[in-house]
Image (tube, helix red, strand yellow):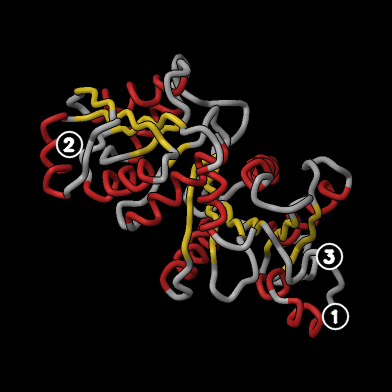
């Protein structure tokens, strides 16, 4: 798949999904929900201060016809009700509105009615980059600060699950480090080498992987050839697994602001897709994140 517009078409080809939005009284969130409804891909359940949601929708010229509005005053109640709706099968996707990330994630991780699984939660971001020939997924840019090897296994498996409907055939994974040389004293390099070996032995699913790879070799066949790297991944990576949150977050924001990439971002590893976008994200990015969630619900 080369563009996010193709992903939109894929989302439109499946039955609409119910999306539970915690504290939906936010302009960009309502705009994204409205566009998703126009595409026919969601049936929204909006939790929050009902008068505020209705007033804001009227100011923005958004129709709430087709939405279910449920009154809930506090952020904690909004998060609990939205997450519980998914946990009890009344919704397929949960989305963060104006509720803080801490409150929202506490609800997700609640042992009684939350969405936790045996997997680590991780951030996955699907990018359409003008200079790259297909969609590419970046992980982890927002959740796991300094993941150890076992956490990186979970992060990788989460990424693969969310890319299975995007790639043709086995996803190609690049485990990133600053250099292609395997260095025992460098955790990023050593972990990348071990993960690559695990992938070759089928421990990470139906994937093609290599690492450690520097970013240029992962995405540029010319750069890889110049370095003398021979790999089926170089220049054609579908998934970039970053060694830590600093590199992941910097790359995410560089692609967004410098490369003007379009992006769809989710939290993976739960019982259902989680739309957890930044307050700084545009309505389009929020919409594309909803689209990505629908495809994976």
Q: Residue at x 41, y 36 (%)?
A: 42
Q: Are marks 1 and 3 in contact (CB under 8 Å)?
A: no
Q: Residues within 10 Å of mark 2 (few under 14, many from 20)?
A: many
Which tag, 2 or 3, sits closer to the chain's start? 2
- The residue singled out by tag 3 in the image is 232
Residue 77, position in %: x, y?
A: 26, 23
Q: Position of residue 66 (x, y in %)?
A: 29, 31
Q: Are marks 2 and 3 in contact (CB under 8 Å)?
A: no
Query: Which residue: 75% across, 57% down?
Result: 172
Taking depth in this image into account, of 266 and 169 the one nearest to the observer is 169
Q: Is residue 148 visible?
A: no
Asked if one can make out residue 109 in the rendered structure from this viewpoint, the answer is yes
Q: Where does the C terminus fall, quadrant-wise?
A: top right
Could you tell me how far apart the alpha carbons at marks 2 and 3 are, in whole angstroms? 50 Å
User: Crowding at label 3, few (<14), some or many (≥20) Cα neighbours within 10 Å?
Assistant: some
Q: State which mark lies toward you, 2 or 3.
A: 2
> Mark 1: which secondary structure?
loop
Q: Earlier in the sequence, mark 1 or mark 2?
A: 2
Tell me, for residue 53, which label it has, or none.
2
Which residue is depicted at the point 62% across and 44% down? Answer: 162
Q: Is residue 148 left or right of residue 295?
A: right
Q: Is residue 48 above or below residue 215?
A: above
Q: Secondary structure at mark 2?
A: helix
The image quarter in which residue 182 lies: bottom right
Calculate the distance from the C-alpha at mark 1 to the C-alpha at mark 2.
58 Å
**Number of residues whose C-alpha sits closer than 10 Å to that of mark 1, classed few (under 14), some (14–19) or many (20 or more):** few
Identify the disc placed on residue 228: 1
């Amino acid at each position: 798949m080369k563009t996010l517009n193709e992903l939109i078409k894929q989302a439109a080809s499946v039955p609409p999904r119910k999306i539970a939005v915690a504290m939906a009284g936010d302009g960009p969130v309502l705009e994204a929900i409205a566009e998703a409804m126009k595409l026919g891909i969601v049936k929204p359940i909006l939790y929050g201060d009902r008068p505020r949601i209705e007033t804001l929708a009227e100011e923005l010229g958004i129709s709430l016809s087709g939405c279910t509005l449920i009154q809930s005053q506090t952020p904690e109640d909004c998060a609990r009700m939205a997450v519980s709706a998914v946990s009890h099968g009344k919704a397929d996707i949960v989305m963060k509105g104006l509720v803080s990330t801490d409150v929202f994630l506490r609800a997700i991780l609640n042992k009684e009615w939350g969405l936790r699984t045996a997997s680590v939660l991780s951030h996955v971001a699907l990018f359409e980059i003008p200079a790259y020939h297909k969609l590419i997924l970046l992980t982890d840019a927002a959740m796991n600060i300094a993941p150890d090897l076992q956490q990186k296994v979970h992060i990788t498996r989460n990424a693969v699950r969310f890319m299975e409907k995007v790639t043709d055939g086995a996803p190609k994974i690049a485990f990133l480090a600053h250099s292609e040389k395997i260095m025992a004293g460098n955790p990023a390099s050593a972990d990348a080498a071990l993960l690559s070996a695990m992938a070759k032995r089928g421990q990470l699913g139906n994937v093609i992987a290599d690492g450690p790879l520097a970013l240029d070799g992962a995405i540029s066949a010319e750069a890889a050839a110049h370095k003398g790297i021979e790999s089926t991944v170089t220049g054609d990576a579908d998934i970039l697994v970053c060694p830590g949150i600093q590199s992941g977050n910097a790359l995410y924001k560089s692609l967004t602001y410098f490369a003007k990439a379009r992006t769809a971002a989710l939290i993976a590893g739960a019982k259902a897709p989680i739309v957890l976008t930044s307050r700084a994200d545009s309505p389009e990015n929020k919409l594309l994140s909803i689209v990505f969630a629908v495809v994976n619900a």
